[in-house]
Image (spheres, rainbow, N blue to C red):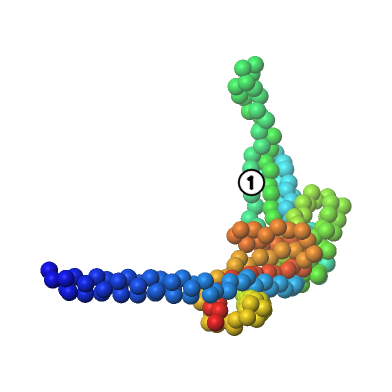
Amino acid sequence: MKPVAVAAIIGLCAIIAFAVVANAYKYRSKTQETIVVTGLAEKDFGSNLVVWNGSYSRKAFDLKSAYSELKADESTIHAYLNGKGVNNSEIEFSAVNISKDFTQNTGADGRVESQVFNGYTLQQTVTIKSANVNKIDPISRQATELIEKGIEFSSAVPAFYNTNLKTVKMELLGKASADAKARAETIAENSGSSLGNLKKATMGVFQITGKNTNEDYSYGGAFNTSSKNKTGSITIRMEFEAD
């Protein structure tokens, strides 16, 4: 191969290598000219749906007698709730759960030798679903008054929900995005550059906690149902070009 051709090939390789290095440096510089921020938005809101459960039971050796007593309790509870202003459409009674109770007699070796039948236990649950949160909440605490009527009524803690969470979430996303952009603009201005195009946006987890509580956020998203008043929050991570 002639020296001239060799020189030409070497020169071409040098040009290509220079171009590659230059493009790599240009790409490296471009990737460094990025502003990454996280925006946050919070909103307080109330509940518009309450779900409350209460349970009661009767026990007797005779199944028919136990069932009769349980249905009498159901009528008493229904009347009690109506008297408190709860509508029939808001009240739902579950099917009756029936179980047999036994006492086990064990021997010295710990093995069961015999069983003694103690009767039937019938249990039922009443569920109240209502949009009138402020009405049902105090009733859930007053329902122990049924004990005075001879009913062993157990009241659960009511659960509070908001059926408009989609609207709340969309509002928070808008506010979090605006917050992130404002942060990025401040960073760009203080660094002597201007904010470029949005390169990437990643939404964080939607969190719902009780208002003015110390609840921790959850990796999969907190979903508070024990508080009437709640706080929704969301974050969004945004990456901008810096010009």
Where residue 218 appears, as percent x and y from the top left, is: 64, 58
Q: Residue beneath label 1, please?
A: 98
Mark 1: secondary structure: strand
Residue in the picture at 26% in, 73% down: 11
Q: Measured along the vertical axis of the image, is residue 106 above or below residue 225?
A: above
Placement of the C terminus among the 4 image quadrants: bottom right
Crowding at dot 1, Cα within 10 Å, few <14 / some 14-19 / many 20+, comes out as some
Residue in the picture at 54% in, 74% down: 34
Placement of the N terminus among the 4 image quadrants: bottom left
Left/right placement of residue 134 relative to residue 53 reads right
Where residue 214 appears, as percent x and y from the top left, is: 77, 58
Q: Measured along the vertical axis of the image, is residue 241 above or below residue 209?
A: below
Closer-to-camera residue (86/72):
86
Question: How many badges with numbers are in the image?
Answer: 1
Can you tell which quarter of the image residue 78 is in? bottom right
- Residue 88 in view: no
Residue in the picture at 51% in, 77% down: 199
Can you tell which quarter of the image residue 228 is in? bottom right
Where residue 233 appears, as percent x and y from the top left, is: 68, 69
Where residue 87 appears, as percent x and y from the top left, is: 75, 71
Closer-to-camera residue (164/128):
164
